[in-house]
Image (tube, grey):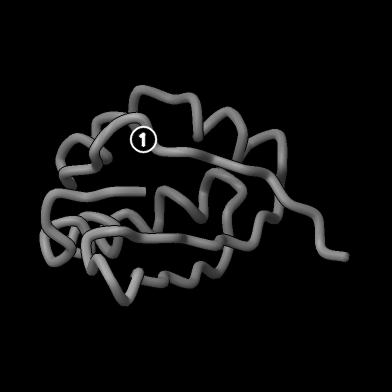
C-alpha cells in the first residue's frame, strides 16, 4: 500500500496494536519497498479470520488508515500458509 509519510503511518500502525489483537489479528511484520520508502507491505498473522475480515471492512480501520495517511484504496489479500 502507499502511504503519504511512512513515519506518520508507522506511529498510527503501532498505536493500533490492541485494536488488531482484539479483532483476530496477531503478530505483524512491516516491509518497505527499497525503491519507494512510502510503499509498505504488511503481513499479519490472523487468529480469527471472521473477526479480521469484519475489522478490515470497519469504519474504525478506515479512520485509522486516513489518520495514518494511507493512499486509498489499500489492497487486502487473505493468504493461507502453504
Quadrant assignment, res 7:
bottom left
Residue 53 image position (x, y, % from top left)? 61, 33
Residue 24 appears left or right of 63: right
Where is 37 relative to 55, above or below? below
Residue 72 appears left or right of 6: right
Residue 28 appears left or right of 32: right
Residue 76 image position (x, y, % from top left)? 54, 40
Where is 68 relative to 17, above or below? above
Q: Secondary structure at mark 1?
A: helix
Q: Residue at point 24% right, 42% down?
A: 70
Q: Residue at point 41% right, 70% down?
A: 30
Residue 82 image position (x, y, % from top left)? 88, 65
**Residue that extends furthest to the right in the rendered view of this protein:** 82
Residue 51 image position (x, y, % from top left)? 63, 36
Near mark 1 (Cα within 10 A), the count class, few <14, some 14-19 or many ≥20, is: some
**Residue that extends furthest to the bottom in the rendered view of this protein:** 34
Residue 31 appears left or right of 67: right
Front one among 32 and 25:
32
Front one among 33 and 9:
33
Q: Residue at point 58% right, 54% down?
A: 25
Where is 82 relative to 48, above or below? below
Task: Count numbered badges in the picture.
Answer: 1
Residue under numbered circle 1: 61
Amino acid at each position: 500500500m502507499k502511504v503519504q509519510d511512512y513515519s506518520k503511518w508507522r506511529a498510527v500502525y503501532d498505536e493500533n496494536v490492541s485494536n488488531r489483537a482484539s479483532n483476530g489479528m496477531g503478530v505483524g511484520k512491516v516491509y518497505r519497498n527499497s525503491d519507494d520508502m512510502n510503499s509498505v507491505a504488511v503481513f499479519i498473522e490472523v487468529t480469527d479470520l471472521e473477526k479480521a475480515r469484519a475489522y478490515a471492512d470497519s469504519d474504525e480501520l478506515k479512520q485509522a488508515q486516513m489518520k495514518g495517511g494511507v493512499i486509498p484504496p489499500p489492497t487486502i489479500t487473505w493468504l493461507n500458509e502453504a
